[in-house]
Amino acid sequence: MKKIIELKNITKSFDGEQPVLDNIDLDIYDNEFLTLLGPSGCGKTTLLRLIGGFETPDSGDIIFLGDRINDVPPYKRNVNTVFQKYALFPHLNVFDNVAFPLREKKVPKEEIEAKVHEMLSLVALKGFEKRSVTRLSGGQQQRVAIARALVAHPQVLLLDEPLGALDLKLRKDMQVELKKIQKQTGITFIFVTHDQEEALSMSDTVVVMSEGKIHQIGTPVDIYNEPVNAFVADFIGESNILDGVMLEDYKVRFSGQTFQCLDKEFMKNEPVDVVVRPEDVDIVPVEKGQLIGVVTSVTFLGVHYEIIVDVNGFKWMIQTTDFVDVDERIGIVLEPDAIHIMKKSEYSNLYGDYSSFSNELDELSELEEEDEDE
Amino acid sequence: MTNKKTRSGGRVAKTSYYATLGPYSLWAMFFILVPLVFVAYYAFTDNNFNFTLEHIQRFFTATSQVIQEDGSSKEVYTYLVIFWRSLKLAVISTLICLVLAYPLAYIMARADAKTQKTFMTIIMIPMWMNFLIRTYAWMTILQDTGILNNFLTFFHLPGVHIIGTEAAVVIGMVYDYLPYMVLPLFSIMAKMDVKLIEAARDLGCNGFGVLRRVIWPLSLPGVINGVTMVLIPSVSTFYISQKLGDGKFFLIGDAIESQYVANNLHFAAAMAFILMVVLLVCMGIMQVLTNRHVEGGK
């Protein structure tokens, strides 16, 4: 595959503060759907703005198809952006908004008409040409913004949390549609989001970031199944993260028991972080369990129950379709492929225990995050 | 959009809404509407308050002799010449104000809050001083032996004769009315979404393209407000022209004043009325043109 953008040792800070981006290296390939994923303030939007040309790095190089473009202004880059709040021009109607970049390039009138209509049918907005953009719904504005950014056929499309302002149903639809548009046009998409589900469902490649650093680059499946550290494991999906010791290849000890696993090439008796996804835990009668615990809470989530189980003081999250009751004693069995071993990192012991877990708290902190993005 | 808001707001508490509106309606009635009616009434009546078009006619037909530079005299339409001159100087001053204020307002709108405050204060300070004093100050600056010419001679540069020319009058008007242009432009530019400028740059506009295709059209309502607020007082300006124009440039405001002082109330009213109609027509045309532009999306 052809490299379209290379970021080399990119560092960026604002007003001499703590760097927002700290020595970032990233290769972006032609025709891929790449997602920059991380909590707010992790530097993902800044990285996008560097590629778009709205910021310049303090050090490091941005290479576009072999050319260094650090100082090339945005209007000379073959890269377009879909902005977070769409940034449609309020004084222009739908047609004129989409035609904007073509008019700047002095494209002949007939060609403009043809291309704008093609784009509007791509985003399912045929018949809205004369409508004022201020009288469109959020989802429609979003589509206009995408059509406008695509009409001049950029080589790369940057999307800055474009679905953040949409409601859940619309967001799901747009995810599918964006993916479809990307396949149809063959343009490289660089998508920024803090929503891990969105990242997993749409991307070819996910880049997990926090505090200005890249933690892991990989396919959604790799990122989910083989997180490199406790931060990634916790940020992508739910995980139980336990302290363990690698006894020998394929043998790990945690929670006072020894388990078979699929990981090897650790030092003998090396302390490790053990990740177990909530859906990989099997619930069995007490006498058959490798571990035994007491259910402390049960939440019904439609497709499954989410239960919290206290095993010797460590609270596990388990997702199960079988109903168990609060205060019930249950057995737990972990198959070897349910266990993922990670090397210890600075993030060890920060995440992965559900002792203070509450759905409400989770939602509150999500709301706060959205506010910060404003 | 604004209309809708007030309307739906009014529906919630209609009675109290009208109750608060009451005093202002009365005020508008007695101090704006009634005087306007009187102006019109005086304009179309003679000293005995009988209907007449005599004063309106006089404005368009009165002639007088002016002595030209070569000594020969020429007959001209007295008031039409004055009116044309007023309009010309007002338009020139307004355009200069716009050219000066537009970049300033843009820079201010993009600056941080502290810089904005400083700029604002600097712009407002002259307005704290009495307008007569400001005009006299400009006289001392522009006179043939004034500050400007002293300054020029000090550096062995040729002096300039400004006082008593149209340029002096324009300088005075621009100085007086510039703040009225800066403020509406600033307020509209401060509200403008920076993301729109970024979007335009992203979509292929260089600096000039952004200005032409995004900033200018979006700032048009501010431009209209600013132009209105500068054009109207400068058309009807007086005193500045008497002092800085050395009495050589009678403007329509001066003409109205002198007729009023001479107790020709009916003719003064007729001139005021004509001026008002012309300005209303101008503003109306401008409004229609910009509405078409600003709401191009509809």
Image (cartoon, rainbow, N blue to C red):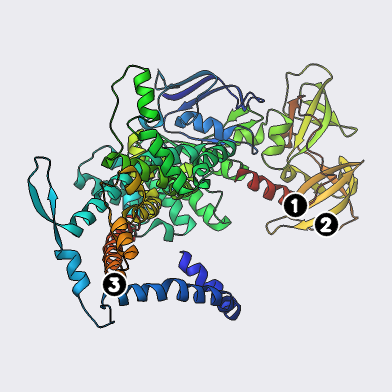
Q: Which of A167 and B286 is in front in this view?
A: B286
Q: What element carries label 2?
A: loop
Q: Provide the chain ID for the residue under circle 2.
A: A
| Relative height, residue A97 to residue A35 (above, below) | below
Q: Mark 1 points at which residue?
A: A320
Does the rendering let one see residue B198? no
Quadrant the C terminus of chain B occupies: bottom left
* Among the 4 quarters of the image, the one containing residue A322: bottom right
Give the image location of residue B16, x and y in percent: 61, 78
Could you tell me if the residues under marks 3 and 2 are in contact, i.e. CB atoms within 8 Å? no
User: Could you tell me which secondary element the residue under label 1 belongs to?
Assistant: strand
Whether labels 3 and 2 belong to a single chain: the reply is: no
Chain on which label 3 sits = B
Q: Position of residue A196 (x, y in %)?
A: 62, 42
At 32% from the left and 48% from the top, the residue drawn is B241
> Label 2 belongs to which residue?
A324
Query: In this view of the protein, which residue sits in the foreground, B271 or B72?
Result: B72
Q: Is mark 3 on a helix, strand or loop?
A: helix
Residue receiving disc 3: B266
Left/right placement of residue A336 relative to residue A223 reads: right
Q: Alpha carbon of mark 3 to alpha carbon of mark 1: how far? A: 94 Å
Name the residue at 45% across, 43% down.
B134
x, y percent for residue A28: 48, 27
Q: Do labels 3 and 1 share a chain?
A: no
Q: Mark 1 lies on which chain?
A: A
Q: What residue type is labelled 3?
A: His
Q: Tell me the quarter of the image containing the N terminus of chain B.
A: bottom left
User: In the rendered view, does B146 fall on the left or right side of B24?
Assistant: left
Query: Pointers 1 and 2 in contact (CB under 8 A)?
Result: yes
